[in-house]
Image (cartoon, rainbow, N blue to C red):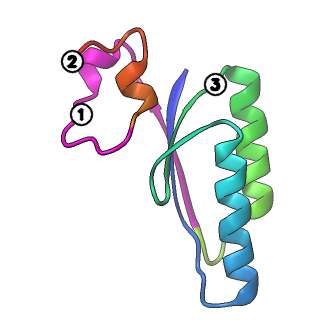
Amino acid sequence: MMILITYDVSTETREGRRRLRRVAKTCLNYGQRVQKSVFECQVNTMEMARLKDQLLNEIDEAQDSLRIYRIIEPLRKTVKNLAIAKRSILKTHSLYKA
């Protein structure tokens, strides 16, 4: 399944900056960065559960925001790419044809 992960981690403290780096590193293990705090990931059900658990272990639920969106396929009907500066998993996905 294709998912989009977005997060906003409070970086006012040293620990917050450390959480931010750990969240980004976790996301990089499953997909690619498309904006500073946005990642596209192609995962199966087990990977999704593991990723969610890992991210929840990294964030501070009282200070941070974390969202995971499932992108419904076929991507060509649900995703519109506009002004893409970087290569995107969605753009190269076999089901996405702009």
Please report contact status of discs 3 and 1: CB closer than 8 Å, yes or no.
no
- In terms of sequence position, does the residue under pointer 1 or pointer 2 come before the other? 1
Closer-to-camera residue (92/16): 92
The answer to whether 79 is drawn above or below residue 76 in the figure is below
- In terms of sequence position, does the residue under pointer 3 or pointer 2 come before the other? 3
The answer to whether 18 is drawn above or below residue 94 in the figure is below
> What residue is shown at x 65% (from left), y 69% (from top)?
20
Mark linked to residue 98: 2
> What residue is shown at x 70% (from left), y 43% (from top)?
52
What is the magenta range?
Answer: 65-86
- In terms of sequence position, does the residue under pointer 3 or pointer 1 come before the other? 3
Q: What is the three-letter code of the residue carrying label 2?
A: Ala
Mark 3 → mark 2, Cα distance in angstroms: 22 Å
Closer-to-camera residue (63/79): 79
Closer-to-camera residue (77/82): 82
> What residue is shown at x 72% (from left), y 49% (from top)?
26
Residue on which disc 1 sits: 81
**In the picture provided, is 42 more to the left or to the right than 98?**
right
Q: Quadrant of residue 29?
A: top right
Mark linked to residue 62: none
- Label 2 environment density (alpha carbons within 10 Å; few <14, some 14–19, many ≥20): few
Please report contact status of discs 1 and 2: CB closer than 8 Å, yes or no.
yes
> What residue is shown at x 33% (from left), y 15% (from top)?
96
Q: Based on the picture, tell me whether residue 95 belongs to the magenta stretch.
A: no
Q: What is the three-letter code of the residue carrying label 3?
A: Val
**Which secondary structure, mark 1?**
loop
